[in-house]
Image: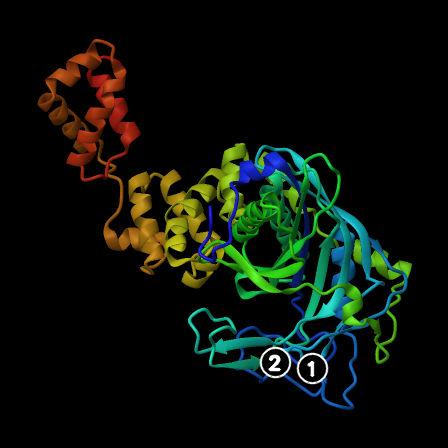
């Protein structure tokens, strides 16, 4: 088949029948430091363009950089969490290339002497299998500015009438984490890529070194992919799909490039080593520029910065600050909470682990915490295009309110239906669960006489159903309970109603 760009692709299964994929993933992570990598400018996201700049990050003559110590410590902690060796001595280098959003005409990075190297990250797939992704390096560098192309329909330079450059992002600390070639994944290649980036995001979040908001660009993935004839053991010519900014897009980009490469190769063509642009709306990649090799960047040691040489004592002190690995924490919490694999997977996919943990710590049962956060709150958050934690924070809905709501149910004031109404009121900003229940008149009828009268009325109005229950078909009691609840306007306790009905019909 062909795409909207006219490039032919093969189906994924057809491509794998003839070729083996090899991947390499490069993830850029903006560190959550208060200031930039080599100067004291703030790093706040969303500030007015070109208001967080100074002579250093603008590359003005005579301005000298100074390394951000917190960024170096964050880099070491990331390396340790990825099971890397930490360099006892390393240097920064100048990576020379020209772009309008690179004010110095070079990027201060690390070339052949990264801060961390030779590590790995184990990632779990949907079927429970674990794939080890080997890490080649994690190195420090600075981010570039940001270009905005105006006047076209695509937001890209082609077709634009002019471009604007915002240098606020220039100089923000970055860690680039580069995998070794990921081989042998075959049909699981897209899933492995997505699972790796997801696991890496969870790890970085647990380390509290970045907010890892892919939608804001604080975590971005470059997807390198090549194909070689099945069983050859060779590596083909690679392409690099740049700045993929969602987990779903990482998976889709791998799948698309497998099909595109296979179509080119099976047609007798050759792959051009180039960068590619990912298009979220159409799910395809388009050609960017011919990919440069390392020698084209004319790397040389940065003369204005001293080497970084962390002592063994410093590295070990930082190792002691590492949190429980996210995968181990999830398994521990699943066991403590008593969730099934499916329930835990749903909680993970919804990003609810921390919120449920806080709610359980506040006094709620794990079942109630999962129920109330993954129900109406999740539905509304999804409609608003937000994750549940950020949506709840924006509304001011708290774990303590879940505890309060559960207490109203276990204390006998509300049944499940009433509790749902109260929770909807909380989400609508009507107050706490108790305040909403008071305002809406939500309370179970405690008058046993009124409930018994309703039961007698319903039994009299449904003699056929009553006779079935007398004959031993106890499951038919549900129909009568529904009628009782209707007559009591939902303010009866269903369990009590069931007990009275069965007693009346000789089944109690």
Q: Residue at x 81, y 57 (%)?
A: 116
Is residue 412 positioned above or below 181 on the image?
Answer: above
- Which residue in the structure is indicated by mark 1? 57
Residue 210: mark: none
Q: Mark 2 sits on what residue?
A: 167
Under tag 2, what secondary structure? Answer: loop
Q: Residue at x 57, y 36 (%)?
A: 126
Identify whether 58 is placed above or below 220.
below
**Residue closer to the observer: 407 or 367:** 367
> What x and y, as percent, mark residue 315?
84, 58
Residue 143 shows in the view:
yes
Image quarter for residue 371?
top left
Which image quarter: residue 295?
bottom right
**How many marks overall?**
2
Asked if the residues shown at circle 1 and circle 2 are in contact, with their CB atoms under 8 angstroms apart, the answer is yes
Considering every residue shown, the one lying at the far front of the view is 268
Label 1: which secondary element? loop
């Amino acid at each position: 088949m062909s795409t909207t760009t006219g490039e032919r692709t093969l189906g994924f299964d057809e491509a794998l029948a003839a070729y083996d994929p090899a991947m390499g993933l490069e993830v850029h992570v903006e560190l959550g430091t208060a200031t930039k990598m080599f100067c004291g400018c703030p790093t706040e996201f969303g500030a007015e363009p070109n208001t967080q700049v100074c002579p250093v990050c603008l590359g003005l003559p005579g301005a000298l950089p100074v390394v951000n110590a917190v960024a170096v410590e964050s880099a070491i902690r990331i390396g340790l969490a990825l099971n890397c060796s930490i360099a006892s001595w390393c240097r920064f280098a100048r990576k020379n290339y020209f772009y309008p959003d690179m004010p110095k005409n070079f990027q201060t990075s690390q070339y052949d002497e990264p801060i961390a190297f030779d590590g790995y990250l184990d990632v779990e797939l949907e079927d429970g299998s674990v794939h080890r992704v080997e890490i080649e390096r994690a190195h420090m560098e600075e981010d570039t500015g940001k270009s905005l192309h105006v006047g076209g329909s695509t937001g890209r330079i082609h077709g634009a009438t002019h471009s604007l450059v915002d240098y606020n992002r220039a100089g923000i600390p970055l860690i680039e984490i580069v995998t070794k070639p990921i081989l042998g994944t075959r049909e699981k290649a897209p899933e492995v890529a997505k699972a790796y980036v997801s696991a890496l995001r969870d790890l970085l979040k647990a380390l509290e070194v970045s907010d890892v908001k892919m939608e804001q660009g604080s975590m971005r993935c470059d997807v390198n992919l090549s194909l070689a004839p099945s069983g050859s053991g060779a590596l083909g010519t690679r392409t690099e799909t740049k700045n993929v900014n969602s987990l779903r897009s990482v998976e889709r980009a791998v799948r698309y490039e497998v099909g595109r490469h296979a179509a080119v190769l099976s047609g007798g063509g050759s792959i051009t080593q180039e960068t590619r642009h990912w298009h979220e709306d159409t799910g395809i990649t388009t050609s960017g520029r011919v990919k440069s090799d390392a020698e084209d960047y004319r790397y040389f040691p940065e003369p204005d910065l001293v080497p970084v040489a962390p002592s063994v004592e410093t590295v070990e002190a930082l190792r002691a600050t590492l949190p429980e690995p996210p995968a181990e924490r999830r398994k521990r919490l699943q066991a403590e909470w008593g969730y099934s694999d499916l329930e835990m997977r749903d909680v993970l996919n919804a990003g609810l682990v921390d919120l449920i943990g806080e709610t359980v710590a506040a006094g709620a049962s794990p079942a109630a915490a999962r129920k109330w956060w993954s129900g109406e709150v999740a539905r509304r958050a999804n409609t608003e295009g937000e994750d549940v934690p950020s949506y709840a924070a924006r509304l001011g809905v708290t774990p303590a309110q879940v505890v309060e709501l559960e207490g109203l149910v276990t204390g006998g004031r509300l049944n499940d239906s009433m509790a749902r109404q109260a929770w909807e009121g909380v989400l609508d900003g009507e107050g706490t669960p108790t305040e909403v229940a008071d305002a809406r008149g939500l309370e179970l009828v405690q008058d046993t006489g009124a409930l018994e009268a309703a039961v007698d009325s319903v039994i009299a109005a449904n003699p056929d159903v009553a006779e079935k229950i007398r004959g031993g078909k106890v499951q038919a009691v549900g129909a009568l309970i529904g009628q009782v609840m209707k007559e009591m306007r939902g303010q009866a306790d269903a369990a009590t109603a069931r007990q009275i009905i069965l007693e009346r019909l000789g089944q109690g």
